[in-house]
Image (cartoon, grey):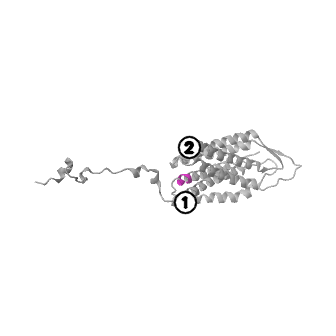
Amino acid sequence: MQYFTMGTWVLVLALGVAWAGTLVGLICIRQSRLSVTAKFRLVWLTAAAVCIGAIGTQVAMSVTMLGVGLSSGVVRYDVMQRIIALVVAPVGILAGLIIAGDNRKPVRLALGALVAGLCLALMNYLGLSSLAVQGSTTISPAIIAACSVLLLALAAGLLWATRMRVTTALVGVSVVYAGAIIGIHYLGLSGLSVHIDPAMSQPAGRDLFTMFIPIFVVATMSLAIPITAVLVAPDRTGRLQPEARTKRVPKDPRKRRIAGPNRTADTARTTEPVG
């Protein structure tokens, strides 16, 4: 198989989509901690899951598939499997975020990473198995197992990193995630073997380019929705510093109320007649 039939710009575009989707998703997670109600918090987490799981992961992986081709014959894709993969990824990320919670306790973090990682592994397998050629395809079980383990570790790292609140740190996390998810995808492609048989009929399915372009345009344009929501959201950053509200201003001892004979020296001095 050939991975860059359209040029290496496909790889650059895939990394850019993965980075942008992941970064916007991480910012939505940070914004969810500032929500005053559980309803709005769930809305922010859902937006984050769509940005990370659908755009930053599945759509970015689909971009790389635009460069996948054969020396002879055509490549088609099963539409239903691609749709399921597009849905499974954000659902898994959302479930992982809810299970992990805000405190990121080890047990809850591990359980959330397990759910999110397994959904990402299923998404990766569906994406690879959706490919059809004039012949047959086989996927190496060892490569699939390796990708699944790496996706579990990547999901755990992502959930752990969501506690970060500094924008520069989130940018760094999104860069690492983008490189890792695209690298894991190419690892999965290396385990995909294609056997061309001219005697067989042409493969069923749809061409990825005509099927994917509308999804890509809608997905990238939809990033404007959470970005705008973050920009117009009320500034509640003061909630991140509760100690500022509990800090008390020390009282001036000279303003204490005079109470009978137990007056202090400062109080007595301020009340004695002048001259």
Residue 125 drawn at (x, y percent): 73, 47
> Quadrant location of the C terminus?
bottom left
Q: Earlier in the sequence, mark 1 or mark 2?
A: 2
Point out residue 37 in the picture as x, y percentages from the top left corner: 53, 58
Q: Which mark is residue 105?
A: 2
Look at the numbered disc 2 and give the secondary structure of its residue: loop
Q: CA distance from mark 1 to mark 2?
A: 29 Å
Which range is magenta? 28-32
Q: Is residue 109 left or right of residue 34?
A: right
Q: Position of residue 99 (x, y in %)?
A: 60, 48
Identify the image quadrant of the N terminus. Answer: top right
Using the image as rendered, state which of residue 51 and residue 209 is in the foreground: 51
Q: Quadrant of residue 219?
A: bottom right
Residue 4 is one of the magenta-drawn residues: no
Q: Mark 2: which amino acid?
A: Lys
Between residues 268 and 275, which one lies in front from this camera angle?
A: 268
3 and 175: which one is in front? 175
Q: What label does residue 229 carry, if any?
A: 1
Contact between marks 1 and 2 (CB within 8 A): the answer is no
Q: How many marks?
A: 2
